[in-house]
Image (cartoon, rainbow, N blue to C red):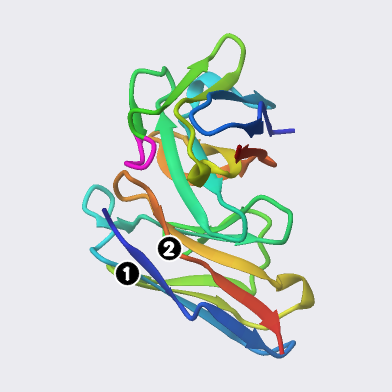
């Protein structure tokens, strides 16, 4: 199984500042069929289901604000929120869809400092 | 509007059974692979199972293999999860989620999620 490890487990950032969440996979999720990384990011607010933010490691889902961006390749990935807004307080998860079993990171809780 | 609505959760004793349903609307259900994902109270997301668009291919997490069965009825636009031999550690909110299958091959990131149904296994 591919193990996904996020860091940090929790993060407190001031409003308007940059937030960075890291995700490392135990093996590469770069697929040779299309040379794309099979890595997605989700946001989950309390009491709500997860919401897709980013797929293919860096493609923003329709409707997601452009302050959210994804980067990285192979085994190391980053979710960046360029200017934190109050509504961004949530848990964030990375997920690999390279192979089954599909696996998620343990989550990162983002709060306002 | 694209929508997934789970139902069938509840309180069940250890060793019991439950069948979850996920009603799909607003899209061509029969064209999409589907997932079940669960989240124990205060914990992270855990993938449970997935099924191909025609139901011919299924996969399971090791923790549920042999106890849970995923299926679908494309005529009824409904996904199912039959859960047998339930354990306390199966207590969770269970979400159904849709693969991305737009414009060709299907990929396993989860574009659409239901609101979830709660399963509690306790005596």
Dot 1 crowding, Cα within 10 Å, few <14, some 14–19, many 20+: some
What residue sits 59% from the left and 83% below the top? A11
| Rendered residue at 66%/40% (across/down) | B116
> Which is more N-terminal, label 2 or label 1?
2
* Chain identity of mark 1: A
Q: Is residue B49 magenta?
A: no
Q: Are marks 1 and 2 in contact (CB under 8 Å)?
A: yes
Give residue A24's position: percent from left, percent from top. Answer: 35, 71
Work out whether residue A5 or residue B26 is closer to the camera in this orientation and state it. A5
Q: Quadrant of residue B107?
A: top left
**SS for dot 2:** loop
Q: Measuring from the top left, give residue B55's x and y in whole percent.
A: 41, 18
Asked which quadrant contains residue A44, the reply is bottom right
Q: Which residue is mark 1?
A: A73
The chain that hosts pointer 2 is: A
> At numbered mark 1, what does the secondary structure look like: helix, strand or loop?
strand
Residue located farthest toward the top when viewing the structure as drawn: B75
Q: Is residue B120 above or below residue A53?
A: above
Q: Residue furthest right?
A: A86
- Say left or right for B95 vs A48: left
Q: Looking at the image, is B5 positioned above or below residue B37?
A: above
Main SS category, magenta section: loop
User: Which quadrant of the figure has residue B63?
Assistant: top left
Query: What segment is highlighted magenta in the picture?
Result: B60-64
Q: Which mark is residue A57?
A: 2
Is B49 drawn above or below residue B111 in the view shown?
Answer: above
């Amino acid at each position: 199984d591919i193990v996904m490890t996020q860091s940090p487990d929790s993060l407190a950032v001031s409003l308007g500042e940059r937030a960075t969440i890291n995700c490392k996979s135990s093996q590469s999720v770069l697929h040779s069929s299309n040379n794309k990384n099979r890595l997605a990011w989700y946001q989950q607010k309390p009491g709500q289901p997860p919401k897709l933010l980013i797929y293919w490691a860096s493609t923003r889902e329709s409707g997601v604000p452009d302050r959210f961006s994804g980067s990285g390749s192979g085994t190391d990935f980053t979710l960046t929120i360029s200017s934190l807004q109050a509504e961004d307080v949530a848990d964030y998860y990375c997920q690999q869809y390279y192979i089954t079993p599909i696996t998620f990171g343990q989550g990162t809780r983002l709060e306002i400092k | 509007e694209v929508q997934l609505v789970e139902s069938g959760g509840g309180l069940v004793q250890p060793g019991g059974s439950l069948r979850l349903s996920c009603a799909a609307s607003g899209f061509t259900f029969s064209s999409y692979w589907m997932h079940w994902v669960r989240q124990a109270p205060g914990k992270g997301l855990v993938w449970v199972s997935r099924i191909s668009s025609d139901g011919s291919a299924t996969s399971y997490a090791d923790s549920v293999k042999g106890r849970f069965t995923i299926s679908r009825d494309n005529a009824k636009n409904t996904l199912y999860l039959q859960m047998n031999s339930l354990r306390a550690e199966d207590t969770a909110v269970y979400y159904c989620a849709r693969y991305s299958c737009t414009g060709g091959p299907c990929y396993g990131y989860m574009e659409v999620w239901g609101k979830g149904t709660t399963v509690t296994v306790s005596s």
